[in-house]
Image (cartoon, grey):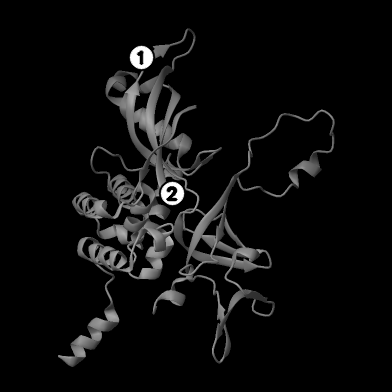
Amino acid sequence: MFTAFIFTFHVIIKTTHEFSKYKHQLRRSVIETLNKKLANKVVHNVGVCISLWDMTKYEDSYLLPGDGASHTIVHFRYVVFRPFLDEVLLGKIKSCSKEGVYVSLGFFDDILIPADALQHPSKFDDSEQLWAWEYATDDGSHDLYMDIGEQIRFRVVDETFIDTSPSGPDSSSIDVTEQTDETKKNPYTLLGSINEPGLGLLTWWNNT
Amino acid sequence: MDIVKENAGMLSNMEVYTLLTELQAGQNGQKKPNKFQQNLATISYEAVKYLENTPCKDQTTEIVANFMKALAPFKLTKAEKLQLLNHRPTSAVEIQLLVEESEERLTEAQIEQLLDVIVEHLGSDPEPEEEAMEDEAS
């Protein structure tokens, strides 16, 4: 579920009052800047950035005229949450709706198991607002409810990245309020499925 | 920012867990996230909390290396080995889930062997209920 990505990044360190300690601080300042820039953020077509793994190379630092900051290009590896397709993950059920089951990993929430990827046959219980698997046995069918907070094992079947970076000012539309009302988009969403034996709530398969 | 190489290497849960716990403790040349690094503090806390509930908590580099050697005869792909490591399956149905086309690639005996290897190297889930029963019996 985690992989390392190699990046290069142009790090600008404002050196102001720390200049005397600069030599010792460079490594630390770079680490700090990178973690500040990337940790807990979704990078488009990359995934959720977790933490710096290591730095492989610094290029020479340089100064620009009229600017007190030092500029350094750094090559580094960063730990990224990016499950590969068909990977099996373990999560907790966050909520259920008609669309399907929402799953959370604690540090990542935008996972949906759509209704057609649940165990077959499943039904949505309107009164409980929960999904249930109608498990057929010899003496009729049992409803196995998918309660909120239960641990669930699912397979990643699709991922979507949406570019949420602000677009430039649109000259044609003057109506600003309409734009701000736009629903918040998730930059990175995973689609899961549990319609295979072994997938679904852990308690379903414990005794087999 | 430029991406030089995507997916430069898959990391096991154990590696990420070690990195983040060291980070939180400020060990190994790492520095604890300070107040300007709220994002890092949040994500490392949440990720550690998640990883603590997975089998990776008890794994060490040595255990993982031995486990990988023991898996060599099964001819699994890298991703499958990683998943076995992260999930520590305990039943045949889980193996079928994690190993693609396991029916064709592995015989039933091999699946049993695989489960044995997993128990041998990664241990098995502590089962408090069983222990409690044994206590009663003794």
Question: Which labelled disc corresponds to residue A20?
Answer: none
Q: Residues within 10 Å of mark 1 (few under 14, many from 20)?
A: few
The answer as to whether the residues below labels 2 and 1 share one chain is no
Q: Is residue A105 above or below residue A66?
A: below
> Picture coordinates of residue B94 (x, y %)?
39, 66
Vertical arrangement, residue A57 with respect to residue A191, above or below: above
Q: Residue at x 75, y 29 (%)?
A: A169
Q: Amino acid at mark 1?
A: Asp
Q: From the image, tell me which residue sits under label 1.
A: A60
> Which residue is located at x 60 percent, y 76 percent?
A132
User: Can you say whether A44 is above or below B134 in the image?
Assistant: above
| Residue identified by numbered label 2 | B43
Q: Secondary structure at mark 2?
A: helix
Q: Chain of mark 1?
A: A
Nearer to me, B116 or A184: B116
Q: Quadrant of the C terminus of chain A?
A: bottom left
Q: Is residue A67 left or right of residue B63?
A: right
